[in-house]
Image (cartoon, coloured by chain):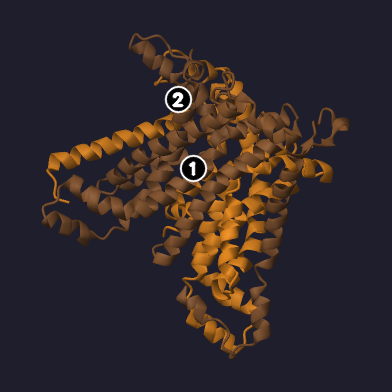
Amino acid sequence: MAQAIALQPTGQYDDALFSVRRLLPVPAIIFMAIVTQVPLIVTLGYSLERWNLLRPARRKYLGLDNYPDVLSDPDFFTIIANTLIITISVVAVTLVLGTLLALLLNRDFPGKGLVRTMLITPFLIMPTVSAVLWKNVLFNPAFGLLAALAAMLGLPRPDMLQDFPMFSVVVVIVWQWTPFMMLILLAGLQSLAQDQIEACQIDGGGPLVLFRYIVLPHLQRYIELAVLMEILFILSVFGVIFVLTSGGPGIQTTNLSYGIYQEAFQRWDIGEASAMGVFAIILANIVVLVFVRVLRRGQAEGVAV
Amino acid sequence: MKRQPWVNTSLTALTYIVAFAMFFPILWMIITSFKTEAAAFAFPPQIIFEPTLDNWRIALFDSNFLEHLINTLIITLASTLVAFGFGIPAAYALAYYQTKRSDLTLMWLISTRMLPPVGVIVPLFIIFRDLGLRDTHTGMIIIYAAMNLPLVVWMMRSFFLDVPYEILEACRIDGTTLLQEFRLIVIPLALPGLFATGLLCLIFAWNEFFFAFNLTVTKAAPVSVYISSFKTAEGLFWAKMSAGATASVLPVVIAGWIAQRQLVQGLTMGAVK
């Protein structure tokens, strides 16, 4: 930061040149404004209309009427609840698993590189492939590996996606996102100064004391960052749900992304889908506001960037 | 940390077991891709079998896989180039020519990456339909470029800040032009960062599904959309499905393995180094 400020014009450089260079971000800003902000405003506009693509002739300005319609639909609350259940349970489980794995990997042992490589692979695989893989090869009630395992133990073969749809969706997303949490927390652990650890041990601190009073406070910023990033991504999960359950059975695993997709591209109700989209934006914005604050604080403390 | 040796050994054993368990579904997918269709859904699952390459041949060459793979390649590479074209000059200026608005620009850019895709998909669908961008490479390139641009700006800015500014100052006093400064000094010094950023853009664009699924039909549909059509396979083409799935994730998995450290940086927008 300090370096950059030192480059402010001091009269020594050509001021005209300096201002040309300051304009360099403008194309990027214009591009991003057109591609991201224009659709955002249009979403707000559509949310005020009655507009079904199957009956385009009946398109009409409604004012805010779509919003009470969305809010009075009991399905909408199920959808919001599903979104929160998926997000919160995935984040909680990946946080615990990710921390444990990061601690396990933050040691010296033979084959460490290979182990880390194996562990991050689920995160690199495209969500549709993971979902197709789990749905067919693992969860299939007739031929899947879980069914085989159950049969071996003399248990009835489970139909995971039918009987435990939410659990199955969460399992697959947890599988994908645990490596993410692990990677960031591992980076955090590796930046912990060794002398702090030794000082704690010399004072007679056991592993639990060490974790609680040295490791955890140090990890706090990394945890905040990883949790917030993950929340934003998981709130918008789509591919896994589309492939695994199509939001079902019924709407048991329909989250906001999937619900809006159905409203817009199966029922073709542009107005209501847009109103639901506005709720999705509000939800994400709450998280983003917290996120920006955490990032800013990081910059101020000089911990990050 | 001084521990009893047996504690260390058992922790290591535990690590191996967990890593194997996490990797197992992928391993099984790879194994299944070398089975015959009959062996693929034999019950109980077979561990010992006669390997065959037939599924790979059929999955890659007797299907539409290659067309979709080419779509993915075109869209990912072109969108990364566009994101670089817009993003690098912006990152450069935000690193070295700060104004009062720089911080705000940076925060605004990062916030666009965090918009939920469902919040913009409906207008994008309509706009794309009206402009004839639906199911075209151009349309997808625009979307993915916008998706990756904040990442490019954030990561490249943090790499540019690592370039010793005395060099730039010296350049400027010598009167080099902007292009020379860029070509001769900044880009060569930030090259590792450029490579890492590009790799991440490729990974994100390659794996994206939501926009691709809603904005393409067949002509421009990438591999992620093609693979999702196996969601109702029901044990019929497991071996071919596994071969296709393995082939479609291979480039990105290898890229990710190579760029593990950069992956962390990119995922946190450079906030963790």
Asked which quadrant contains residue A71, the reply is: top right
Quarter of the image that includes the C terminus of chain A = bottom left
Vertical position of residue B58 compared to residue A28: above or below: above
Vertical position of residue A297 compared to residue A115: above or below: below
Residue A149 in view, yes or no: yes
Vertical position of residue B208 compared to residue B198: above or below: above
The secondary element bearing badge 1 is classed as helix
A66 vs A113, nearest the viewer: A66
Q: Residue at x 33, y 52 (%)?
A: A219
Asked which quadrant contains residue A171, the reply is: top left
Q: Residue pushed farthest right? A: A57
Q: Which chain carries label 1?
A: A
Q: Which residue is drawn at 19% across and 40% down?
A: B9
Judge from the rendering whether residue B150 lies leftward or rightward of residue B27; answer left or right.
Answer: right
Q: Which residue is drawn at 41% across and 50% down?
A: A224
Judge from the rendering whether residue A94 lies leftward or rightward of residue B11; answer left or right.
Answer: right
Residue A254 picture location, percent across and down: 58, 27
The secondary element bearing badge 2 is classed as helix
Q: Chain A is drawn in which colour?
A: brown
Q: Which residue is drawn at 52% across and 61% down?
A: B155
Residue A138 picture location, percent across and down: 46, 22
Q: How many labels does the image show?
A: 2
Q: Mark 2 lies on which chain?
A: A
**What residue is pinned by disc 1?**
A231
Chain identifier, colour orange:
B
A53 vs A27, nearest the viewer: A53
Judge from the rendering whether residue A108 lies leftward or rightward of residue B29; answer left or right.
Answer: left
**What residue is pinned by disc 2?**
A167
- Please tell me how crowded label 2 is: few (under 14), some (14-19), or many (20+) other residues with Cα within 10 Å: some
Amino acid, disc 2: Phe
Amino acid, disc 1: Ile
Q: Earlier in the sequence, mark 2 or mark 1?
A: 2
